[in-house]
């Protein structure tokens, strides 16, 4: 069934704040040249960490798989260019913790020589969709809107969840970020080609492409590309500019009127939501047999000399990317990965760009002022009004602060999308999101501990059961032997006990006779 009046609904809360996109919007600063070394973290996605399939010193080619995952939720890593594996070791990665993680270091040889790639699949609509999902998985495609969830898993909704609507997310609501906007303006055909593939893979009845109304050029380009593609039941819907319109649940609500249930996922209500850049990556994987090796990154803020968007191969240091945006200006104060609402501050720029890196915001003091001193909550309720997930942020804050993690779950902590709207409006300047991130991390750690304890208990029970079974089997074997002997003796008509005693006595008498015979013969010989 086709959605009637798509885009006519609204989501709760949200905020209006300056979008600060004009600095970089529509500007392409080119492809970042390859440096001498690329640093490729094995964990660039949600799910299991990839495992290296190459050795130090090995020569690799562009597009070659260098790490793969055996778990269902995960994504392989490919060499963004040709070169030699220089090391497989811990290296600082872009993460709020600032910690290091396992990485593959690739010494670039400058030849940019492609390895063997799978066949392009231009006639994909004659194929079994499972083969296309397999191709998407091979290509290492993850959500490029920032979430980095493996796309092959997302499009594997299962036969019991038919998909009515494929939602394509071109909202890009986070301030400062314009890489999706540029992609839609300049490569709309590539995005639409990916939509064609995705529509076939998920067997959706329609596709709704949501774009905020602050991107008129992108809307026009996408409408043109859709019209020229001849695709039916695909519509570009202009949605109001309001943060966080690009949140998956929020965009689905605005476009279709449907609510994703608490703790649920969109496929439960017949919807799958994919980012525009992810759709473009699907085109490359299916139509050209190319894996995901680079992405568009917005470099912006008053702290860089030239704001714009660059195509960046994965593994390039952020310092190298900033250098290609004209370097830092004298206003540079803070480097943020992502936007000002959902991003996090980096302690260093010697960190690699990964699949989820959509923006480097080199902010000035005015753009990223030091946080105001937090004051006690005055229970004004503004955070509740702003929360797009319709949570009670002040309650969540109280319980997170009190480390009452049962209560935070009761108040739907895991429905919080960490959009930061509550912190933004809080007159007491309480860093609410930090409390929610802390509560989530602690809850995961506790659950992991619980799981480990449960696994240990199961292992112990299994061992005890195995030992008891072995003992039972040993006793059964003895009993069987005894029964067999008794049966045999009974069949010979004798009392088994008496027969055993008589046999023993006979053996003793025979032994004695042999001994006396031996003594006698030794006396005669002497
Ligand atoms: S906005 Fe801040 S002060 Fe107001 S209720 Fe929420 S946490 Fe408390
Ligand atoms: S960060 Fe979480 S609690 Fe705060 S407004 Fe966003 S969804 Fe609601």
Image: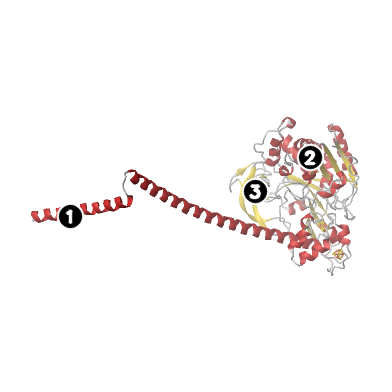
**Helix, strand or loop at mark 1:** helix
Q: Is residue 289 left or right of residue 386?
A: left
Query: How many marks are shown on the rendered structure?
Result: 3
Q: Nearer the viewer, residue 421 or 146?
A: 421
Residue 278 position in % (x across, y down): 77, 43
Please tell me which of labels 3 and 2 falls first in the chain. Answer: 3
User: Where's the N terminus, which quadrant?
Assistant: top right
Name the spot of residue 39 as percent of width and height, x first: 67, 51
Q: Using residue 354 as the reference point, say whether residue 525 is left or right of it.
A: left
Residue designated by label 3: 50
Closest to the camera, between mark 1 and mark 2, is 1
Q: Which residue is mark 1?
A: 515
Q: CA distance from mark 3 to mark 2?
A: 30 Å
Can the viewer see residue 85 in this picture?
A: yes
User: Where 225 sits versus 343, above or below?
Assistant: above
From mark 1 to mark 3, how far is it between C-alphas? 78 Å
Do the residues bearing badges 1 and 3 touch, measured as CB atoms within 8 Å? no
The crowd level at tag 1 (other Cα within 10 Å; few <14, some 14-19, many 20+) is few
Residue at image mark 2: 163
Asked if the residue at label 1 sits under 8 Å from ligand 2, the reply is no
In the image, residue 429 sits, relative to residue 467, either above or below, namely below
Which of the colour schemes (rainbow, by chain, secondary structure, one colour) is used? Answer: secondary structure
Mark 1 or 3: the one toward you: 1
Please state the horizontal and vertical placement of residue 96, each as a whole percent of the image: 73, 59
Judge depth for marks 3 and 2 and give the one in front. Answer: 2
Q: Which type of secondary structure does the marked residue at label 3 adopt? A: loop
CA distance for labels 1 and 2 = 95 Å
Q: Earlier in the sequence, mark 1 or mark 3?
A: 3
Residues under numbered marks 1 and 2 in contact, where contact means CB atoms less than 8 Å apart: no
Q: Residues within 10 Å of mark 2 (few under 14, many from 20)?
A: many
């Amino acid at each position: 069934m086709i959605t009637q009046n798509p885009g006519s609904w609204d989501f709760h809360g949200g905020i209006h704040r300056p979008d600060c996109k004009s600095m970089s919007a529509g500007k392409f600063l080119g492809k970042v040249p390859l440096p001498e070394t690329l640093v490729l973290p094995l964990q660039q996605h949600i799910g299991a960490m990839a495992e290296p399939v190459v050795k130090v010193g090995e020569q690799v080619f562009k597009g070659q798989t260098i790490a793969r995952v055996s778990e269902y939720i995960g994504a392989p890593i490919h060499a963004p260019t040709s070169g030699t594996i220089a090391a497989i070791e811990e290296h600082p990665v872009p993460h709020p913790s600032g910690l290091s993680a396992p990485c593959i270091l690739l010494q670039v040889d400058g030849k940019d020589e492609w390895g063997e790639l799978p066949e392009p699949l231009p006639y994909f609509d004659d194929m079994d969709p499972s083969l296309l999902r397999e191709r998407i998985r091979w290509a290492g495609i993850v959500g490029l809107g920032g979430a980095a969830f493996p796309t092959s898993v997302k499009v594997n909704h299962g036969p019991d969840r038919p998909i009515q609507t494929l939602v394509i997310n071109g909202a890009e609501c986070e301030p400062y970020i314009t890489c999706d906007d540029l992609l839609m303006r300049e490569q709309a055909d590539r995005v639409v080609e990916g939509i064609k593939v995705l529509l076939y893979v998920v067997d959706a009845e329609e596709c709704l492409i949501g774009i905020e109304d602050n991107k008129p050029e992108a809307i026009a380009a996408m409408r043109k590309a859709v019209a020229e593609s001849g695709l039916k039941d695909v519509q570009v819907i202009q949605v109001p500019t309001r943060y966080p319109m690009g949140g998956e649940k929020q965009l689905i609500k605005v476009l279709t009127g449907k609510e994703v249930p608490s703790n649920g996922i969109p496929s439960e209500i017949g919807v799958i939501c994919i980012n525009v850049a992810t759709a473009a990556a699907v085109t490359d994987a299916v139509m050209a047999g190319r894996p995901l090796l680079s992405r568009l990154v917005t470099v912006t803020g008053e702290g860089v000399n030239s704001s714009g968007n660059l195509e960046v191969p994965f593994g390039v240091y952020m310092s190298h990317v900033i250098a290609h945006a004209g370097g830092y200006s004298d206003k540079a104060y803070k480097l943020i990965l992502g936007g000002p609402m959902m991003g996090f501050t980096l302690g260093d720029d010697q960190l690699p760009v990964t699949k989820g890196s959509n923006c480097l915001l080199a902010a000035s003091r005015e753009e990223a002022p030091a946080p105001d001193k937090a004051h006690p909550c005055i229970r004004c309720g503004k955070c509740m009004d702003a929360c797009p997930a319709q949570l009670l942020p002040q309650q969540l804050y109280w319980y997170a602060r009190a480390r009452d993690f049962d209560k935070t779950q009761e108040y739907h902590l895991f429905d919080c999308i960490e959009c930061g709207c509550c912190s933004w409006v809080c007159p007491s300047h309480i860093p609410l999101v930090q409390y929610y991130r802390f509560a989530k991390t602690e809850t995961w750690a506790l659950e992991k501990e619980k799981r480990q304890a449960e696994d240990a208990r199961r292992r112990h029970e299994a061992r005890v059961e195995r030992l008891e079974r072995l003992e039972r089997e040993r006793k059964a074997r003895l009993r069987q032997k005894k029964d067999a002997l008794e049966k045999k003796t009974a069949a010979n008509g004798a009392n088994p006990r008496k027969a055993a005693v008589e046999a023993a006595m006979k053996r003793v008498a025979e032994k004695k006779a042999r001994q006396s015979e031996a003594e006698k013969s030794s006396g005669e010989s002497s």
